[in-house]
Image (cartoon, rainbow, N blue to C red):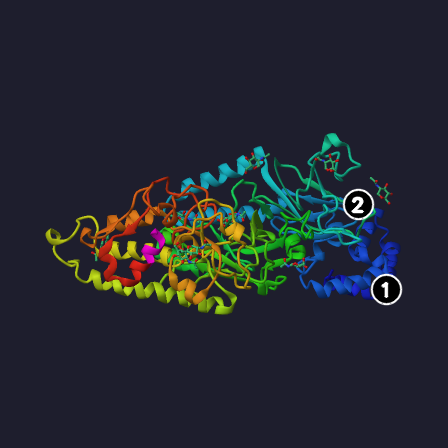
Amino acid sequence: MQLSPLQSRLAASLIATCLLIALYLTLFTPHFALAETLLQEALPPILDDLDHDLELELDLQAAPTQQHDPTYEPEFAAFDRSIIGRAPVGVMSLTNNVEMSLNVEPGSTQVFVFELSATSGEERNDIRELRRGTDTGDLPGDALEELEEERRVERRQSGRTVYISANTCEQPQRKTRSNSDQGPPQLTLYVSTDASNESPGPQADASTQVTFNFTEGAIMYNLTTERPVFIGVHASNASAEFQGGYNFRVAASTDTFFHSYSTEEDADLILVDTDSQGALLMTHNLTDSSDPVLHDRIMATQPYVMFAQNEKEGSINGVRQSYCGLQVYAQIAATKDGKSANMVKTAMTKRGPGKLPKQQFYFTGLNASADYIGILAQNGNLTNVGNGKPGGGGHVFRATAFTTKRDNGNCAIIQNLQFCDEVAYSVPSNPSFGDTEKLAEFYDSYASEVFENFKKVMAQVPCEAPNVQRYSLVRNCSDCNAAYKEWLCSVAIPRCEDFSNSTDTYHPRALSQPFPNGERLDAEILGKFPNLTAYNSSRNPRIDEVIRPGPYKEVLPCDDLCYALVQSCPSSLDFSCPRPGDAGFSSSYATRVPGQLSCNYQGSAHLVSGAGRMGEIGYMSSWVAGLSLGASLVMAGVI
Ligand SMILES: *[C@@H]1O[C@H](CO)[C@@H](O)[C@H](O)[C@H]1NC(C)=O
Ligand SMILES: *[C@@H]1O[C@H](CO)[C@@H](O)[C@H](O)[C@H]1NC(C)=O
Ligand SMILES: *[C@@H]1O[C@H](CO)[C@@H](O)[C@H](O)[C@H]1NC(C)=O
Ligand SMILES: *[C@@H]1O[C@H](CO)[C@@H](O)[C@H](O)[C@H]1NC(C)=O
Ligand SMILES: *[C@@H]1O[C@H](CO)[C@@H](O)[C@H](O)[C@H]1NC(C)=O
Ligand SMILES: *[C@@H]1O[C@H](CO)[C@@H](O)[C@H](O)[C@H]1NC(C)=O
Ligand SMILES: *[C@@H]1O[C@H](CO)[C@@H](O)[C@H](O)[C@H]1NC(C)=O
Ligand SMILES: *[C@@H]1O[C@H](CO)[C@@H](O)[C@H](O)[C@H]1NC(C)=O
Ligand SMILES: *[C@@H]1O[C@H](CO)[C@@H](O)[C@H](O)[C@H]1NC(C)=O
Ligand SMILES: *[C@@H]1O[C@H](CO)[C@@H](O)[C@H](O)[C@H]1NC(C)=O
């Protein structure tokens, strides 16, 4: 735990603080509630026990993330209020879109008030914005005035929607470490707009307030009112296994939730692939627009952050939907100055169908065969970050679960290839061959070699000829080149899965060869597979000669890549795709199944919706002999 400068000072001079408060009490004799609040602010939970204090120091070193909001501004607290004299004593007043960070001890309640008049500045902003809208020439001045007046009246009559949100940043911790258990009790939110209840909480009349438990450290609640909104945040007594108090942030807004989390079913983060010590994840398309200027603008940003956690580690239990809670408790935080941030590299990319901007996260240093969750989050909402900005408190998306591969060490993620620039998945590998850059270079140079040969053949096709002489009116040579490249990169760079993976469309390869650690498959296991080249070697013999990955499963290329090739290229090239049931069908290609990674294509990932079912597989017939590398490549897959 870390103390804000204010709190450190107070901690350092505890006695002085007590004297000060005593003096304050004698001089001003404020209500007891106020004194209590002050004490709570002044004395973090740990100060009543010196041993805890020591522990705190240690924690500090282990987790340099901040715990108490540095932006916490005491001027919003008790002093101001009593001077202004508007809010009841002991009740802190909230400013529109400004979060307040506070501690709350188990068994106690912190009370806030949000008054709509505090938003008048905001209203002026709205109107300014409205005017700005007319600069683009929509409304004449008169109409604008009318609209403004209308809005004002509307607001006065029907009240405004107030969005209340809060996040738990710290929570009591178990005295003895235990990973799988539940977190401490969630905080509870009480909201009252009833004149008779200015101190909502467990003691107040239940009929004058609404009550919600936080969910995984977060709460979002909106209501429409024209009255001051009283908000109580209560911490119930935790069981004796826990120690420490809570720290939370609360905000009210008339615009939108300051803190938010996703409630939709769909995962917001897409798993591209894993290997035994890493994972590659990416966001959805960040825009549907094909405007290159917008693309450039988006590509220059990195709008998201990410948290990851080994499922065995229980530290985030109870705060999985809280941005600041994740920042404090997540094992890996891909945020600025986040915990173990060196385990994550993030970048913008346009890989994948549609070639639209996305952000990707590449994790390394994970444990093999381990279950993780990745949680995508946004610090603010792209444009608005921090206090004073609607939605500036951050957004937490739904978690995505993923499992790293087993530690056979023979599948490794490669990416950033020069020629096959859409490749970003696990390929057959062997730690003794070299690092992933060298591995990427091996596969990429092989594919581009084959492509060079293909270009020589294409040189004889009349591409630039007038329409009548061209091979097709709808497809031209660039289409053919693109289709060939897409097919080639998928076929020449096999997508690797653990040998132990039981998905039945994945094809076992190189079974008769040793794993990188020298072990071989038992004769018993080997006996279950046909003694055929398609099983006892890789699709491309070079992989077995140079990389020597040993047994793995290949996610076969999608059959539609072959159809696209046949359709896009001149018939004189004589490409053809075999039919289902042809010999070797099932060892060459697989069919897309929506929602599954049933086959490989450039830019494929988990949980993508496929393009519907088609049938058949593909190979290229004898003319390809001219492309010697291509031929062996294809033939190996077809046997
Ligand atoms: C919570 O604990 C305090 C002090 O231990 C006690 O006074 C209070 O009654 C407890 N509250 C509840 C609801 O159990
Ligand atoms: C909040 O959680 C407590 C403890 O789990 C439960 O007793 C209570 O009914 C919940 N309250 C609401 C409003 O869901
Ligand atoms: C809360 O917000 C939602 C969505 O913005 C809206 O549908 C709902 O009517 C609001 N509730 C109140 C009480 O304003
Ligand atoms: C991105 O957009 C393209 C084209 O609309 C679509 O095919 C693709 O599935 C989208 N990708 C993601 C990850 O949402
Ligand atoms: C890997 O496993 C060890 C032992 O179980 C654990 O201490 C460590 O936190 C794990 N690391 C990651 C990144 O999951
Ligand atoms: C961020 O929030 C503001 C205020 O609600 C909104 O105007 C803006 O469009 C939001 N930006 C994004 C990228 O969602
Ligand atoms: C080939 O056709 C595509 C449209 O199918 C077109 O965009 C492209 O410019 C054409 N290329 C050449 C070299 O004509
Ligand atoms: C097999 O691989 C697929 C794709 O990577 C993955 O979704 C699935 O969980 C794996 N199954 C097993 C049993 O490892
Ligand atoms: C597979 O067949 C080859 C020759 O056809 C033979 O030499 C080899 O021993 C066989 N392997 C197994 C495991 O049966
Ligand atoms: C693989 O199978 C083929 C075909 O049966 C056989 O000729 C070859 O010897 C086998 N290779 C190994 C290493 O078992």
Tell whether 155 sits left or right of 483. Answer: right
In this figure, which residue is indicated by the disc labeled 1?
16
591, 44: nearer the viewer? 591
Q: Which mark is residue 238?
A: 2
Q: Residues within 10 Å of mark 1 (few under 14, many from 20)?
A: few
Q: Quadrant of residue 117?
A: top right
Q: What x and y, as percent, mark residue 630?
A: 30, 60
Residue 315 falls inside the magenta stretch: no
Q: CA distance from mark 1 to mark 2?
A: 31 Å
Q: Point out the residue furthest to the top here.
A: 207
Q: Secondary structure at mark 2?
A: loop
- Observer able to see residue 285: yes
Query: Is label 1 or label 2 in front?
Result: 2
* View quadrant of ligand 7: bottom left
Task: Residue 635: say if magenta.
Answer: yes
| Residue 145 tag number | none
Viewport quadrant of the N terminus: bottom right
- In the image, residue 412 sits, relative to residue 109, either above or below, namely below
Please indicate, yes or no, whether residue 500 appears anywhere in the rendered image: no
Q: Residue at x 79, y 62 (%)?
A: 55
The residue tagged with tag 1: helix, strand or loop?
Answer: helix
Helix, strand or loop for the magenta stretch, by majority: helix
- Three-letter code, disc 1: Ala
Of 534 and 547, nearer the camera is 534
Which residue is pictured at 31% across the width and 48% down the height? 618
The part of the chain drawn in magenta is 633-639
